[in-house]
Image (cartoon, rainbow, N blue to C red):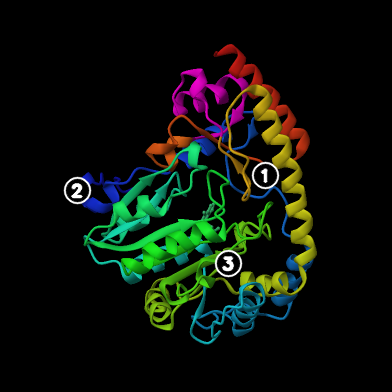
Amino acid sequence: MPKKLKIKKEIISKRVNSISKSGIRKFFDMTLEMEDVISLGVGEPDFVTPWQIREACIFSLERGYTSYTSNWGLYELRDLISQKLNKGYKLEYNPKDEILITAGVSEGLDLAIRAIINPGEEVIISEPCYVSYSPCITFAGGIAVPISTDISSEFKPTPEQINESVSDKTKALIISHPNNPTGSTMSKKELEGIADVVNEHDLIVISDEIYEELTYEGKHTCFSSLNGMRDRTILLNGLSKAYAMTGWRIGFVAGNVDIIEAMMKIHQYTMLCAPITGQFAAIEALKSCDEAVKEMVADYDRRRRLMVEGLDKIGLECIKPKGAFYTFPSIKTTGLSSEEFAERLLNEKKVAVVPGNVFGASGEGFIRCAYAVSKDVLKEALSRIESFVKDNR
Ligand SMILES: Cc1ncc(COP(=O)(O)O)c(C=O)c1O
């Protein structure tokens, strides 16, 4: 056996070295080694992809569809997405060159940032936020400029905060509603306030709307649909969450033809195309699964209420999430840090949650609990959290 080469730290690029591994994965890996753990950790539906979607995929395989697709993705899928955006928000995107199918929103995010950011340019992000935003900006040579939000403003960034964070190097702003990890959403009026600042400073908005369908109160507003925002917005969305299709790796981006063309350049050289089986599955999902999505959303909603009531009873302050499938309670009354709380809750009560600080500095003092598990499991988790909090007050 040849001797393994010890790779020096300097071999790895400075950008990659500057980033630590995802804090969510750390807790996920810890749970794999333990028995009887209830995981409220991973942001993934507990539902299996609806049967008709799986069946459509099997049928595509039976017909022998195993090749690459066009770099853009299957035309039928892009056309369905274009129709959906038109029906939902009266938005018009040409399926030919304004919609690109990606390997999840994850790829769309990376493409969007790499397509527009030059080294040293700044991107404003509102924290706490999804763990990939800041690393993707760093990988592209950009600089993430975080805005801190807190529970008193339901973790929503204000136009004033964005305005104050703009410098002559600011190129873009990333927003996400409904939000991971807080479950917070923004109203049309609140988004219009942000759009004004975006216009004033000539910014591009990367709007991650992956939880769009998981909106329980009010109506989702697509940022691109706001006055003047269509061509300034790179809209990211996908099928992972609403259709319980995380493993299929299908997302899409919609935006101005020149920006999408630039993203496509990176995509065709690095990804080539999203998986064909996933694309066939996605076509079926968009054609026939509105009912299935509705049922899953209704179920998440019931769990959301249970979770909020439970946390309230335990005495952990929490905003009532209006979307996604997360609660983000404060654990400040315990005097423990987010990491200590999560680690001890896992070791002592076998409940996995994610420490809030992995979503940005302003997430310290909070934990993220996903309610993508059954009601019975949630009840048991809440009872274990209650007993842990009692021991630590
Ligand atoms: C806000 C947000 N954006 C993007 C993603 C990644 O989604 P996808 O599975 O489409 O890559 C996630 C996954 O948790 C997320 O929470």
Residue picked out by circle 2: 10
Quick check: can you spot residue 160? Answer: yes
Dot 1: within a 10 Å radius of its alpha carbon, few (fewer than 14), some, or many (20 or more) residues?
many
The kind of secondary structure element at disc 2 is helix
Q: Depth check: give the residue in front, 151 or 93.
A: 151
Measure how far apart labels 2 and 1 are at the Cα level. 41 Å
**Residue 349 x %, y %:** 62, 21
Callout 3 crowding tier (Cα within 10 Å): few <14, some 14–19, many ≥20: many
Residue 227 or residue 278, whichever sits in front: 227
- Residue 381 visible, this orientation: no
Percent x, y of residue 198: 37, 65
Q: Is mark 3 within 8 Å of ligand 1?
A: yes
Relative image position of residue 76 (x, y in whole percent) = 64, 83
Q: In the rendering, at what x and y percent does residue 104 appear? A: 53, 64
Question: Residue 8, relative to residue 172: is it above or below?
Answer: above
Q: Are marks 2 and 3 in contact (CB under 8 Å)?
A: no
- Mark 2 and mark 1 lie on one chain; the one further toward the N terminus is 2
Q: In what element is the residue under mark 3?
A: loop
